[in-house]
Image (spheres, helix red, strand yellow):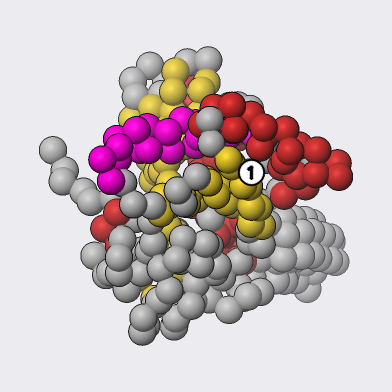
Amino acid sequence: MGQKAHPIGNRLGIIRGWDSNWFGGNNYSDKLVEDEKIRKYLSARIAKGGVSKVVIERTLKRITVTIHTARPGIVIGKGGTEVDKIKEELKKLTKKDVQINIFEIKRPELDAQLVAEGIAKQLEARISFRRAMKTSIASTMRMGAEGIKVMTSGRLGGAEMARSEQYKEGRIPLHTFRADIDYALAEALTTYGKIGVKVWICKGEVYGKRDLSPNIGGATSASGKGGRPEGAAAFGDRGGDRRGGDRGGDRRGGPGGGDRRGGQGGGGNRPGGQGGNRPGGQGGNRPGGPGKR
């Protein structure tokens, strides 16, 4: 069996803070169970709210719940009605005074939990698992991540025998404690069984002492060196299947060897390619080229 440490648990106290911040005392176990209940309840209650994580802090009589979400509008509701409802429901659940804060995630593509859940939803919608993984990798790298690894396991594509497949781009140094690596697991409930989705995202390296208070640690985008700058060339720009790729993209507009119209590379088989087999190509096998007829 592979002995693998959880990438987030491995970095606790070094560059990551805890998601539950309180002193346990004699009834530590009760508080722990209550935290789990709150998290489960919120993930079911706001399933479409793009909730990445729930940070719970406690004082003697009050519980402060901070919801990190990519869609604060859905969580807050019209004029704050939804938040008030959730607040009352949590009061009934915990029998304590509850305060709710909402923290917006500005770049959901750099949050492992949201990326994993996005892939899981696509798998449930019967989209090809390879396509779902590759598009997620492309969008994450485009947003400036230093590296990403995605792994899916289960009856992929409805196959009889379960297997696992993974794709990665960039660097994911799991043994480097100062590397800010976000990790998440999501499950897709498909008609032919569960498919697990694991995502690792490296956001750069953290130098110096980092503030480990729960709403600062992993919420903001990575500090440190080596991250790809915003707007830099990403996965889809190197021979990918998106328009405008620089090397052999198979959508229109790629300047190198594209197989749709407008590619400037050798051997395009649609109009305008140099050496194509349709009119206008240099050396093509149809009229208009200076080569053989």
Residue pictured at 60% horizontal, 66% vertical: 142
Q: Which residue is mark 1?
A: 50
Q: Measured from the top left, where is residue 83 in percent x and y?
A: 72, 41
Q: Amino acid at mark 1?
A: Gly
Residue located at (24% from left, 65% from top): 175
Please name the residue shown 58% across and 79% down the image: 229
Q: Quadrant of residue 243?
A: bottom right
Q: What is the secondary structure assignment of the residue under circle 1?
A: loop
At 75% across and 44% down in the image, what residue appears?
76
Q: Is residue 200 left or right of residue 257?
A: left
Q: In the image, residue 45 lies at what x, y percent? A: 63, 29
- Image quadrant containing the N terminus: top left
* Mark 1, other Cα within 10 Å: few <14 / some 14–19 / many ≥20: many
Residue 274 highlighted magenta (yes or no): no
Q: Which residues are magenta?
A: 25-46
Relative image position of residue 164 (x, y in whole percent): 35, 35
273 versus 39 height, above or below: below
